[in-house]
Amino acid sequence: LICLLLGLVGWIGSTWWIWGFVVVFVFQLAMMVLYPKLIMPLFNKLEPLEGGDLKDELMDLADRSGFAAKTIEVMDGSKRSGHSNAFFTGFGKFRRIVLFDTLMEQLETNELKAVLAHEIGHYKRGHVPKMVAMSALGMLLAFWAIAFLANSNWFYAGFGFEGVVSIAPAFLLFSIMSGLITSWLTPVFSILSRKHEYEADAFARDAMGEYLSLVGALRKLNEKNLSNLTPHPLYSAFYYSHPTLLERESALKSEG
């Protein structure tokens, strides 16, 4: 990708950064589709969930929630850690639900259904396209910034690259220095992510008709994943992408 981007500068000229954004963004979208089908199986074993009451109940929940999944797969997450998770991958007819084997061992049926409903909530509330759109906007601004800095003599001179005609130093310096700016945007993305988690929790509560199953699942997941239940409020507000367990329970009870 880097070689292609550097080549675009010479092939297209001053508007290279627009086409560079298009190339990288299309690549990211392609990876969202190909990763679960081609890359993930290289490192983890995914097998279809065996038929039975559990699969029937999970598929029924997915159908009732408007999430028509092609299949439910179980991933051997236990080969690396005791961390538990559930997620969905793919688009359209390729959509699949993936459960960690550790999750299935730790949770009861209703708790598993609540976790699945939470993940479906992310889909139904449009959280994925919203985050993709925000990522695309940030990437477009980044490409514009690289193009701007590459045309600024003061920028190259300030780092000892005066007289260099290649755009490569601009890529290098931007990759090193961008963290100075993006780190301060962390709380903005954290606030948005926590908002999405609350919305997904509310969707799961409504889909289940009660909130106790989700609360039970969250308590077990926090225990098994060794989560900090009482972080400093300022620290969690800045860094945490998920509300704390106590905050999530409080929100579920107050709205329930």
Image (tube, rainbow, N blue to C red):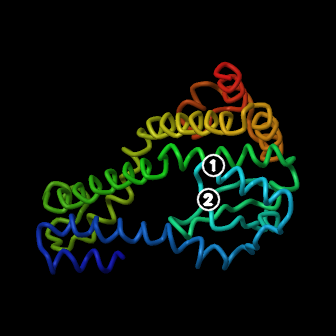
> In this view of the protein, which residue sits in the foreground, 57 or 126?
57
> In this view of the protein, which residue sits in the foreground, 178 or 132?
132
User: Which residue position holds label 1?
Assistant: 119
Residue under the image location 69 percent in, 75 percent down = 43
User: Which residue position holds label 2?
Assistant: 88
Question: In the drawing, does residue 79 fall left or right of residue 89?
Answer: right
Is there CB contact under 8 Å for labels 2 and 1?
A: yes
Which is nearer the N-term, disc 2 or disc 1? Answer: 2
Residue under the image location 70 percent in, 55 percent down = 86
Residue 70 lies, with reference to residue 117, above or below; the image says below
Q: Secondary structure at mark 1?
A: helix
Mark 2 Cα shell of 10 Å, populated few (<14), some (14-19), many (≥20) = some
Quarter of the N terminus within the rendering: bottom left
Estimate the x, y position of residue 208 in percent, counting from the top left: 72, 38
Q: Secondary structure at mark 2?
A: strand
Estimate the x, y position of residue 2 in percent, counting from the top left: 34, 75
Residue 83 lies, with reference to residue 11, above or below; the image says above
Task: Give the residue type that dot 1 points to.
Answer: Glu
Q: Based on the displayed image, in which of its 4 quarters is residue 256 positioned?
A: top right
Residue under the image location 30 percent in, 65 percent down = 171
Q: CA distance from mark 2 to mark 1?
A: 7 Å
Estimate the x, y position of residue 53 in percent, counting from the top left: 86, 57
Residue 85 lies, with reference to residue 182, above or below; the image says below
Task: Give the residue type that dot 2 points to.
Answer: Phe
Residue under the image location 75 percent in, 54 percent down = 58
Mark 1 Cα shell of 10 Å, populated few (<14), some (14-19), many (≥20) = many
